[in-house]
Amino acid sequence: MWVLARQLARTGLGPRLRQWGACVSYPTVAEWTVFLSQPGNLGGCLATVDCGVPEPCEHLNHGRQATLVQATACAERDLEENSAKVHALKPYKSVPRWSVPAEVWRVIFEANDQYQHDLWQCRTAIFRMLVQIRATASTPRLWHQSEARFMSKGNGKDGPAAFRVIHLLDPFSKAFHAAIWGLGDHRRWDFSVGGVSHRRRELALAQQMLLCWRLEHAKVNHIQCFFDIKNAFPSLSRNSIDRMLSLQFDEPENALLHQHHTEAVMNVTDGEGGSTLLKIRSGSTQGDSIGGAIFGQVLGPYMSEGMRRIKGCDHQWPFEMDDFLTGDHVNTALSLYADDVSVVAIVQDAEDATNVAKELFWAVDSAVKPASLALKKDITVVPRFFGRGAQQQMQQAINNSNNNNGVGTWGTTATYLGCEVFAKKCESREITARIHAAQAAWFALSGLWFEHDVPLKSRVRIFKANVMSVLVAGLEAYVLSESQIHKLESWRMAKVRILIEGKGTVKLITPEGDIKIRAIPDRTIRSRSHLFSVRSELCCRRMLWLHDRICHPFDSTAFRALLCQSLPFESYYQLDSNGNIAAHASPWLRQIVDDIAALHARVPAMPLVEQMQFGIRTLPSNNSPLRGLKSKIRKVRTFEIPELQQEEQAQQATSSSFCTCESCDFVGVNKRALQTHRYSAHGIIREVSLRVVANQCPFCKKTFSTLYTARQHVRKKKNSRCPKGGGSALSGTYPLVVPRIISCLFCKFSFDSIVEYNKHLAQCILDCRKKRQDGSGTSTDEQEPS
């Protein structure tokens, strides 16, 4: 479907920057048979060649018979549950060639009244099938047969190891087994997030970032370890899955779920027309509706054993506490999302950090080994040291890993669950990553934005669904500054002005009869396009997430305890005796107070935190005033921007010369609008902002966290001298990030290394200054305002 959508948009760019139309060499069926016959930790699933082809209506008979009354009663419940699960199926998903899409099943269960009479026979046949399933405790064989699809991992490997196997299953089979899975009594661990209802990816991100902030604020040396399980879903042993099912399900649900994985087969094809049927003998299928939930329920007890082994080591572990609301004893240093594990540990120095990382790896790896799982050797470790000699300790810890004395890859930053976390200015790095992802989504539909046959309102709606959602995805877990929110808003409004084309400006006639073009304020454009400000949109998303945590208090015990309570190594409190935030409260607590104040300004029925009986502790309780105001939360979305930015724009508006183009009569609403106009209309660029192509200063050779920070450093040069460093503990330890193609933006020459480019840069800038003196219109003045 995405190929067809990109063809309509006249672009070859697909999801995650995938390209269609390129010639990809897929392995043959014989190569896949050999590769998939390996154990799970080697990339396979112990697959064997299956004998016989399942018949479409053939049922598995396990000899368990139920009475007609029992089977009918269970089938009625199943029909109701399946209707809800079919409604929750994601549309536009690929299905096996012998199946029908999910949209067809939704039409059968959710048709209008005028079509109900024509579909009653189909629903009657479905009900009879459910009665037969319940009577015999068996399901059609075709429900357990998947069609394998292979997606490139982009890991540089050859053969089957370069592809990820995705299983396409019948949508109604996925809905049926998801409904059966919902009948079980599942365990919940405070550290497990993935595959659990009412727990989101942002919960693990916010919890780990909050803990690292508390450790940094207390000046406690620590490390952050990130583990990944090899080929996780297909590696689970069948004995561990059966043991979990027998503990959580009664008959016949246990038998129905047992046969779903024991009778699983996959159809493998290649580009040469070959085809074979392989029987899967380990793990669960990636692509099934309950595959992640099964993996999480099996892995939970083994990770609890891993935590017991970690606490048995001889290093400090002051991360356990009792939740003030539920009384549960929780652990705040471990987060598990599917097969991604994050652990925090306190260390003394660089040598101790290396030993602790090895102990953590051994504890987790040995704990999950009975389930036929294994950790990848290339783990990521982020050390953090404070106090005198912190930078030396940091560099020593990183050097120890480079000398093969440590375990895994050590650095100053890491990517966890697709987000930039656990580093100085991680919010700025994540903002940059979000803008790059939104930029890819924008160009993926580049042919649609200027398709005038499509109404502008429809294009704006597509922009909000496909681009705006990518821009703010996952930012609920962060505490962003006003400048970072303004950066998101500026990028969004720049794209909106491109989308609306000439409707973003207005022509005015002066008393002298001259025609001048003025830009319409951003607030007016947001109001016309019904686009709320990024600040209020993020506030609304955080409030909805907070409301969900309030309604399900047992699903966020670790994060709530870490948010409001003190840790043993802290000598201060997060909240005072009245429940109000204290002087040392975390930014996440202050953000909640600010969000409640924003909601109070729009909905007076919502009291301020200071007006609640027990302060902020009242929010997650059963008597929370926010519990019954879910329908009012969206009122916090506005078209306005913060008052500070409004004053800045008002000052710019009063000074027309500040944002007036010197080459024409254009007046921009801000400096960015003026800079964009000068570049597009007159070709005037600031070469001082284009000198840097990596996160390294080409003059003093210092490395920075982002490319933007390095360019800011170069802009501050005075008298050919770089500014002094800020004294950060991470100064000089950031890894150098070099683009794949290094070329000079002025003379268009290409270079093999960043060193050659830096040597070329000085002479190139001298040539550009001579061109400016010759009247080419290019500006190189370092003091020129942006």
Image (cartoon, rainbow, N blue to C red):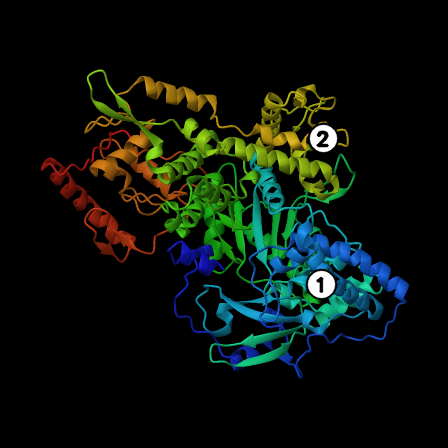
Q: Nearer the viewer, residue 153 or 460?
A: 460
Query: From mark 2 to mark 1, how far is it between C-alphas?
Result: 41 Å
Q: Is residue 192 visible?
A: no
Q: Nearer the viewer, mark 2 or mark 1?
A: 1
Q: Nearer the viewer, residue 349 or 445?
A: 445
Picture mark count: 2
Image-quadrant location for residue 596: top right
Residue where numbered disc 1 is placed:
122
- Name the spot of residue 567 as percent of width and height, x first: 67, 36
Give the residue type at disc 2. Gly
- Name the spot of residue 359 as percent of width and height, x first: 63, 56
Q: Residues within 10 Å of mark 2 (few under 14, many from 20)?
A: few
Please tell me which residue is depicted at 33% across the width and 47% down the height of the picture. 694
Q: Earlier in the sequence, mark 2 or mark 1?
A: 1
Q: Nearer the viewer, residue 571 or 766?
A: 766
Q: Residue furthest left?
A: 774
